[in-house]
Image: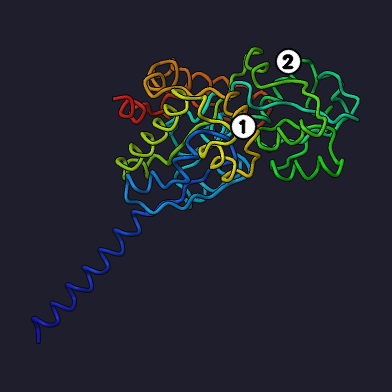
Amino acid sequence: MKSKAWLLLSLAFGLWGTQLHAQTREVTIAHQDMIVPFLVAQAAGAVERSTGYKINWKIFGGGGDVIKAMASGDVPIGEVGSSPATAAIAQGLDIEVVWVLDDINNAEQLVVTRNSGIADLAGLKGKKIATPLASTAHYQLIYALSKAGIKPGEVQIINLRPQEIAAAWERGDIDGTFVWDPVLSRVKADGGKVILSSADVAKLGAPTFDAVIVNKAWAADNKPFVTALVKQLAAADDAYRQDKARYTAESSEVKTIARVVGAKAEDVPATLDSYAFPAAAAQASSAWLGGGKDGGVAKALANTAQFLKAQGRIVEVPADFSNFVNAEYAAAAAR
């Protein structure tokens, strides 16, 4: 009887252990509607096959929403812009940047309606401009206004998610927007006039990028998964860089990307071309994730933090942003 009881107890603990192990092999990843090569691998289940994890891909309308989800503890990995990543770090979220999803380059733009009467930044005064709060687009808008000597309060900046921006544009509720694709292509096709691009803002001194960030503790416990994820990200970018000509509106890759984010296939190739996708070796170097405090990402985050503090959007600026940047996964992907 005793041996039978022990057998049942052992089986029970064995089942519980199996269930617990299964739970640790499931993860929710927050992504946005950025048009990037990795969406092809994401849709194909490449990360699931290479890791054995069950992945819940959850789409969010902006970096601020991703940060909130990660702060709640429900999401350990997410795609965010450099501005919300900076704000999250400054507010005490224990995260690290493990991959540069894209150099935003020319992929975000300030566009105004054909009837707005706006011809330049000065013309924004008193107008309604929509952008997702705490996004890189929001940061670039505020930065450009400050460089032009325009106070944020002189412009009606409205916090809307990309799809909400599209609806507000169609209703005529806003005068313009600083946003990315697929909504960017929609408003431009509707007669929108480009006033400023992210490349212009970078020249003013505020380069921006999108990143993959992870909860530090979760990443430490799931290092093989994070390594495999970054390798898939690097492989997808490599495939695109090596054969851009293949990414046409008729290609399966472009059709997949369009389907995932709700874009038009004919708009995707140009959008991909407006971003830059640094290779793993470059990302592991001081140009991006490497280099410690003097690395490209660490310095960009520090500069962004100084600006956000000056604008009253954060209170404290961490002394060393390299504590929140990890180049080891990019280095592994480059080998």
Q: In the picture, which quadrant includes the N terminus?
A: bottom left
Is there any visible trace of residue 320 in the rendered image? no
Is residue 71 found left or right of 3 in the rendered image? right
Q: Residue at x 48, y 22 (%)?
A: 297
Of the residues shown, which amino acid type is indicated by label 2?
Answer: Lys
Q: Which residue is mark 2?
A: 147
Instruction: Please tell me which residue lies in front, 131 or 6.
Output: 131
Tell me the crowding category of disc 2: few under 14, some 14 to 19, or many 20 or more residues within 10 angstroms, Cα based: few
Q: Which residue is mark 1?
A: 314
Tell me residue 115's x, y (percent).
91, 30
Q: In the picture, which quadrant includes the C terminus?
A: top left
* Quarter of the rendering containing residue 331: top left
| Residue 27 vertical placement versus 304 (above, below) | below
Q: Residue at x 59, y 21 (%)?
A: 105
| SS at badge 2 | helix
Of the residues shown, which amino acid type is indicated by label 1?
Answer: Ile
